[in-house]
């Protein structure tokens, strides 16, 4: 316990530097293990669809303060987020893409980028790249369609009529692995490099035993 919390000494740094071959081998081994983990359990594909959201502040609040405009953006953004995760939108997605439930979509299969003014990104993860693309596309289109329907309905307490929503990118979506192999290589190398350094510092041979030999 005292060794664990003791301040490092010059001998500790010297011992660590002398063992550079050991922790270098550990880093290489960690990178290889990371690569093995990647290919044994490939991460899912992620597709991204985009919807352009414009709040038209110049029309909604032409003469008001920045504080009121900020409140307006926060309030309407929250309403749009609720629409994106609503039963109506997710049920529409489930009806278009087979084998996906609403619970799965809400529990990690779908991800919404930090929304605000401009492009909203709708991400979908799946082991099948085509299915990931279909999910992202269906979600973005269902969201845009539901927003248009609610704007036309003009329900009291609903969305402000100045908002416009356009599904800009719903075809030929960019789809790639959620994590690249380089991420696994780097993580494995860093972890095993740290473990190798700790092994050198805390598990070095006992000098007394070497003298007896």
Image: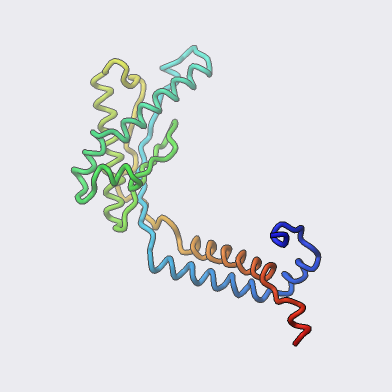
Q: Nearer the viewer, residue 156 or 34?
A: 34
Left or right of 81, for residue 5: right
Q: Nearer the viewer, residue 30 or 116?
A: 30
Q: The C terminus is located in which quarter?
A: bottom right
Residue that lies at the very extreme toward the top in this rendered image: 63
Q: How many marks?
A: 0
Q: Nearer the viewer, residue 161 or 191?
A: 191
Q: Residue at x 45, y 15 (%)?
A: 61
Quarter-of-image position of residue 152: top left
Indicate the colouring scheme.
rainbow
Q: Look at the picture and state if 18 lies above or below 183.
A: below
Quarter-of-image position of residue 114: top left
Image x and y of residue 163, in percent: 36, 24
Q: Nearer the viewer, residue 76 or 9?
A: 9
Image x and y of residue 200, in percent: 68, 70
Image x and y of residue 190, in percent: 58, 63
Q: Look at the picture and state if 211 lies above or below 18.
A: below
Residue that lies at the very extreme toward the bottom in this rendered image: 213
Q: Look at the picture and state if 10 lies above or below 97.
A: below
Image x and y of residue 20, in percent: 69, 73
Q: Residue at x 75, y 71 (%)?
A: 15
Q: Residue at x 32, y 17 (%)?
A: 157
Q: Residue at x 24, y 26 (%)?
A: 149
Quarter-of-image position of residue 151: top left
Q: The N terminus is located in which quarter?
A: bottom right
Residue that lies at the very extreme toward the right in this rendered image: 10
């Amino acid at each position: 316990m005292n060794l664990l919390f003791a301040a490092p000494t010059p001998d500790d740094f010297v011992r660590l530097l002398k063992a550079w071959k050991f922790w270098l081998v550990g880093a290489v081994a960690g990178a290889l293990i990371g690569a093995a983990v990647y290919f044994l359990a490939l991460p899912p594909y992620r597709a991204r669809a985009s919807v352009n959201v414009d709040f038209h502040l110049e029309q909604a609040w032409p003469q008001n303060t920045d504080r009121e405009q900020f409140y307006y953006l926060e309030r309407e953004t929250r309403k749009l987020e609720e629409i994106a995760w609503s039963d109506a939108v997710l049920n529409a997605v489930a009806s278009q893409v087979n084998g996906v439930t609403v619970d799965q979509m809400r529990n990690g299969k779908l991800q919404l980028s930090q929304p605000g003014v401009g492009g909203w990104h709708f991400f979908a993860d799946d082991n099948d790249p085509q299915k990931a693309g279909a999910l992202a596309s269906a979600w973005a289109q269902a969201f845009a369609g539901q927003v248009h329907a609610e704007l036309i309905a003009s329900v009291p307490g609903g969305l402000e009529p100045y908002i416009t929503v356009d599904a800009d990118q719903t075809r030929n979506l960019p789809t790639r692995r959620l994590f690249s192999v380089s991420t696994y290589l780097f993580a494995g190398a860093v972890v095993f490099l740290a473990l190798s350094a700790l092994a050198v510092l805390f598990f070095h041979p006992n000098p007394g035993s070497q003298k007896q030999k």
